[in-house]
Image: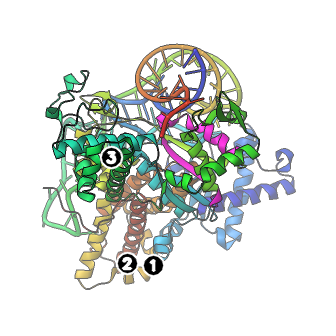
RNA sequence: GCGCCUGUAGCUCAGCGGAUAGAGCAACCGCCUUCUAAGCGGUGGGCCGUAGGUUCGAUUCCUAUCAGGCGCGCCA
């Protein structure tokens, strides 16, 4: 990528000037510096700040002038560096690089030739990365809160794969222990209602639908716990119905109501819910390579092996009849219990085993995408990584902030008790998967997200994500029109002389150059996302490319261009941009439509 | 009490220590006999929460402080 080339050129220049005695590098080596994208194009395509790192103004300007001179020379002498139009020194010592317009335009051919492979980087060098996200327990549907991780994880995974990492996307589900028993008991209660058996009082703990007839102002009162309050449209009611359909023999078990049957029924309910979750994920184009069962850790004995490994490494001790691990040795707030005094293993013990399992599968980096309520994980899991013999950096936890509901301008937390949980599949149905994905990805994962469902529905008309898709559709429209008149735009573009555009009006040329500048930025965006784990930059980038395309479309007709050379060259720009837009949309998990019908 | 996140335009938010802080939406004014107007051009709108500090340079880093959110189990 161009920025890397410039960095290399600058390093070469610094070394040459040092040899010549023109500059004095601290300890003989180049300082840290950046190749930046200036805010205004009048400051060039790129800006180098190394001179200010070496000295204060006005001395920095002198150094910048020397570097600038040498860079210009390099551009003339080395054919591979022949993209520099001019180099200028500005302000306190910025070295501003201006790229030749014809070089920029010519890159459209590079993009077209690369096709879907454009933007594929090798910064990952094939390193294996495991990204775990969503991992919602199969005791209820994914909602707009815990679903946020789905968009972050899936998009980050897509981008990291493009950046040359070998990515495995994974969902860890808890099909083990107490909560499955609870789910089973809740399900039995509903089954009894369905079968017309006396179900008794509704258990105080478990998984139940919000009663149908209760209004918001009643939420602080205890649930009615009567047959009348049962919501036959509720989710758990439907799960119970499906358990009965799937396994009619359950009816007999439910009549008995022995504790051990709860687990059996709970397992069936949980597998139904898991299928629902998988379907929701698929509807939103969120893909997983692996669904990992927590229970399997026990079956494979990894639960015990993980603990044993920690014990052998000397980090396990006993206290108060429980087994502990010394996570505090590695910066955690406190030590954590692995085996309770009653002999049960803790959830944390499963986390240890799961991390152990992931490392054993050969992953170099484990990324966890978790909600803010899992903040406490960071310290303990980083400690676990080290106790298992890996670096703290090999395990990264991305915390995304809470999603609240925006009700009448006030931020309201979703809760089961208030019955105001909005499920993700509901949102996807209302506004569509593409808009949903774009909407979520516009925000940094560190930012809080107040979800206004009404607005989200409205934004389906106004969402900038649609403008990006429209940009893609517009290009497809031109190509379609061209095909209708019997011409082959792709064929014409191949033989285009891009320099033909240099005779366009200044406004046209500016639009064409801006379009190519944006197109070529994709590699930098992918690199940054992969290195910093910040997938939200992709939406901003997509909007920038779309905006550049719309301006170009407005000013620079292709089909109607009088000059056939100009027409060909503009076809090349359109095809290159279509490639970029399609690629960007696909990384976002969105469709790149060839046609969009107006809403009205 | 301790820890983490957030505070930028009317709203929702971008902003990798750099130059005159940006986008979308909302508001206002223009542009369709033209490759889709889901678009383009223009206007207005900012003590970057507050106060110090580091730096040639701070919205960005550090400290304090105010405000909002979240977390601090032998729960999962």
Which of the two residues, B68 or A323, is positioned nearer the viewer here? A323
Rendered position, A289 above or below A44: below
Q: Quadrant of the C terminus of chain A?
A: bottom left
Give the percent coordinates (x, y) of residue A170.
49, 56
Quarter of the image for residue A271 reads bottom left
Q: In the image, is A327 to the left or to the right of A416? A: right
Asked if residue A55 shows in the view, the reply is yes
Whether the magenta-drawn stretch holds residue A353 is answered as: no
Instruction: Tell me which chain the residue with mark 2 is part of.
Output: A
Instruction: Tell me: residue A490, above or below residue A502.
Output: below
Subunit that carries the residue with mark 1: A
Report if the CB atoms under discs 2 and 1 are less than 8 Å apart. Answer: yes
Helix, strand or loop at label 1? It is: loop
Quadrant where the N terminus of chain A is found in the figure: bottom right
| Region of the chain picked out in magenta, as a range | A360-388
Mark seen at residue A497: 1
* Residue at x 52% of width, y 55% of height: A296
Chain letter of the residue beneath label 3 in the structure image: A
The dot on residue A468 is none
Q: Does A439 sit left or right of A335 as displayed?
A: left
Q: In terms of sequence position, does the residue under pointer 3 or pointer 1 come before the other? A: 3
| Residue sitting at x 51%, y 50% | A42
- Residue A141: assigned label: 3
């Amino acid at each position: 990528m161009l920025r890397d080339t410039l960095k290399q050129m600058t390093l070469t220049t610094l070394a040459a000037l040092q040899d010549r005695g023109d500059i004095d590098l601290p300890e003989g080596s180049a300082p840290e510096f950046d190749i930046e994208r200036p805010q205004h194009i009048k400051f060039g395509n790129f800006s180098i700040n190394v001179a200010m790192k070496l000295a204060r103004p006005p001395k920095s300007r002198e150094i910048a002038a020397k570097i600038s001179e040498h860079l210009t020379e390099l551009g003339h002498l080395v054919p591979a560096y022949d993209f520099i139009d001019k180099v200028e020194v500005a302000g306190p010592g910025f070295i501003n690089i201006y790229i030749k317009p014809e070089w920029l335009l010519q890159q459209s051919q590079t993009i077209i030739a690369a096709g879907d492979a454009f933007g594929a980087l090798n910064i990952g060098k094939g390193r294996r990365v495991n990204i775990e996200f969503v991992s919602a327990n199969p005791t209820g549907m994914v909602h707009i809160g815990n679903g946020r991780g789905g968009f972050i994880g899936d998009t980050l995974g897509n981008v990291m794969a493009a950046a040359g990492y070998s990515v495995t996307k994974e969902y860890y589900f808890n099909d083990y222990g107490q909560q499955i028993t609870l789910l089973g008991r809740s399900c039995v209660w509903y089954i009894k209602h369905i079968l017309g058996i006396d179900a008794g009082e509704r258990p105080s703990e478990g998984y139940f639908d919000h009663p149908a007839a209760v209004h918001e102002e009643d939420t602080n009162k205890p649930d009615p716990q009567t047959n009348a309050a049962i919501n036959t449209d509720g989710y758990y009611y439907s799960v119970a119905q499906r358990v009965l359909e799937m396994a009619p023999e359950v009816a007999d078990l439910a009549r008995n109501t022995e504790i051990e049957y709860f687990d059996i029924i709970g397992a069936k309910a949980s597998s139904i819910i898991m299928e629902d979750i998988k379907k929701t994920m698929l509807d939103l184009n969120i893909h997983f390579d692996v669904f990992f069962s927590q229970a399997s850790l026990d079956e494979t004995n990894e639960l015990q092996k993980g603990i044993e490994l920690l014990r052998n490494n000397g980090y396990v001790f006993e206290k108060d009849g429980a087994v502990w691990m010394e996570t505090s040795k590695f910066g955690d707030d406190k030590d954590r219990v692995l085996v309770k005094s009653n002999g049960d293993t803790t959830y944390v013990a499963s986390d240890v085993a799961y991390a152990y399992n992931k490392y054993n599968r050969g992953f170099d980096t484990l990324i966890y995408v978790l909600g803010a309520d899992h903040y406490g994980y960071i310290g303990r899991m980083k400690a676990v990584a080290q106790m298992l013999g890996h670096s703290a950096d090999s395990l990264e936890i991305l915390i995304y902030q809470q999603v609240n509901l925006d009700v009448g301008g006030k931020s309201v937390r979703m809760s089961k008790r208030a019955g105001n949980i909005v499920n993700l599949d509901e949102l996807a149905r209302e506004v569509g998967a593409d808009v949903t994905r774009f909407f979520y990805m516009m925000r940094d994962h560190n930012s809080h997200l107040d979800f206004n469902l009404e607005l989200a529905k409205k934004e389906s008309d106004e969402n900038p994500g649609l403008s990006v898709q429209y940009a893609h559709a517009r290009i497809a429209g031109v190509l379609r029109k061209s095909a209708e008149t019997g011409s082959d735009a792709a064929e014409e573009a191949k033989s285009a002389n891009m320099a033909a555009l240099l005779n366009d009006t200044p406004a046209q040329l500016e639009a064409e150059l801006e379009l190519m500048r944006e197109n070529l930025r994709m590699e930098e965006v992918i690199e940054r996302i992969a290195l910093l784990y910040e997938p939200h930059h992709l939406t901003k980038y997509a909007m920038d490319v779309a905006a550049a395309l719309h301006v170009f479309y407005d000013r620079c007709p292709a089909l109607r261009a009088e000059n056939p050379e100009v027409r060909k060259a503009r076809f090349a720009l359109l095809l290159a941009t279509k490639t970029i837009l399609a690629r960007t949309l696909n990384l976002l998990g969105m469709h790149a439509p060839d046609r969009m019908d107006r809403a009205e």
